[in-house]
Image (cartoon, grey):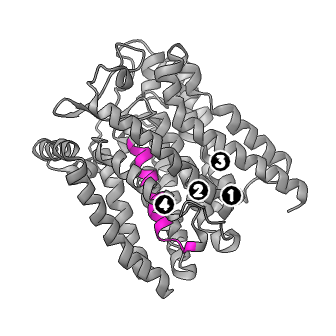
Amino acid sequence: MTSEQEKIRRLIVKLVFVIYWLLIFEGAMRKWAFPGMQKAIFFIRDPFVLAIYWLALKNELWPRWTPLFKFGIILAIVFIPLAFFQVFINDYNPLVAIYGWRMYFWYVPLVFIIGEQFRGKDLARLFRQTLLAVIPIAVLVLMQFRAPPEAFVNRGTDPEALVMLSAQNKVRTSGTFTIGAAQGIFIGSAIAMVMSIWLMPRAFRPMGNVFLLVCTGAVVACLAVSGSRSAFLHALLCIMAAVASAFLVKRMQARLRAIIRVPLIILAGLLAFVYVFPDAYSVMVERFTGAAAGEGGSHIRLLHTITDVFALSDVSVIGRGLGIGSPGAMALLPPGAGLGMSESELPRIVSEAGIAGIFYIAFRFWLSFSLLSGAIAAARNYSNSMPLLVWSFVGLLLINGGMTFQGTINGYGWLFAGFTMAATRMKKDMQPVEPSRGR
């Protein structure tokens, strides 16, 4: 890589950071600062993505044409005429097709650009900045949890805004986002990051012990008052990945870190949940109990989101229309014209895209398992557990998360797929990070 390309690479990394922070704070702009510009703010990240694509193409930093990347791009091209054929056949607003294609494919090249252009020091900076941001966000969600649903901190400037409740008239805290589901995704990513840092060698940690302890407490606080079962599922998956890393890594020091620290982190988190946040603990017990009675448990609900695709009875060969089952379509179509907003990702994709949707699902599964394979190889060959921990967050999103349904989940899924891909290359690119003075 030439010095000029390195300069452009750094610019691309900076633009990815802009996209990432907009993803976290654009909800706050919609909810509190610019409530009348919600539709425009939704697309605020797109110019930065376009700039990255232009820079990568112009400066020969476009990703290598691996079979997985080729398959994703071919699908993206094939889905363009499909989307407009659907518009012609089903007679609906073409803007829905454009919006739907964006939700399916706009970020696909970005995954591979991040995977090739991010270095270990870039990921270290991302982790450090995110975990430091968790501290004020923890204060915000504690205020949201204690406030009534109609409070400004929960509802924002819109008195008609929908606020989801968990139990005991407590809100599902949304943090800087507009909905609790997005906050649950943010918490899941923060859990993967903080666990990764705890399992790193001391020389590679992007923050000192004092800051790490404070950030860990902030993550636990966000999780405790989230009211989100998906956030607790992400925590469980991260713990499972951390335990698995103890068996995969070869270096004894790395194995001992996982064996000793993971149980201590779990124990400390549980004690804090029960004794520091007793009200939140009571709310979540009631929420899980009610869900078990109504759905048969969270695992049953998760299983149904996958198996429901086989229960579809009115699937069109070409599909009903990309994006037609999403909230975006509801804003562009007459009442009752959409599919209905189902949170089950896989059956909605097949309903929207027909047979082509099966190939799109296959691409997402292929991407997820390709990242898992790379993460396992990194743990075995280099005793690097970070890719596996980050995959524990994004792997399920790629397989069955609502990435074509909700904008924040969409952005998180694709960005963290790229971060995971980059993390598998850290043996070559990671350099020791200067320790923070906050030890």
Where 415 falls versus 204 (above or below)? Answer: above
Magenta region: 184-202
How far across and how far down the image is residue 359, in percent? 50, 49
Closer to the eye: label 1 or 4: 4
Closer to the eye: label 3 or 1: 1
Q: Which residue is mark 1?
A: 118
Q: Which residue is mark 2?
A: 419
| Residue type, numbered disc 1 | Phe
Closer to the eye: label 3 or 4: 4
Residue nearer the viewer, 171 or 346 = 171
Between disc 3 and disc 1, whose residue precedes? 3
How far across and how far down the image is residue 53, in percent? 74, 43
| Residue type, numbered disc 2 | Phe
Query: Does residue 128 appear left or right of residue 311 in this picture?
Result: right
| Mark 3 residue element | helix
Closer to the eye: label 4 or 2: 4
In three-dimensional space, the C-alpha distance between marks 3 and 4, rounded to whole angstroms, equals 35 Å
In three-dimensional space, the C-alpha distance between marks 3 and 1, rounded to whole angstroms, equals 11 Å
Q: Which residue is mark 4?
A: 210
Q: Are marks 3 and 1 in contact (CB under 8 Å)?
A: no
Between disc 1 and disc 4, whose residue precedes? 1
In three-dimensional space, the C-alpha distance between marks 2 and 1, rounded to whole angstroms, equals 8 Å
Taking the spot 49% from the left edge, 64% from the top edge, the residue there is 209
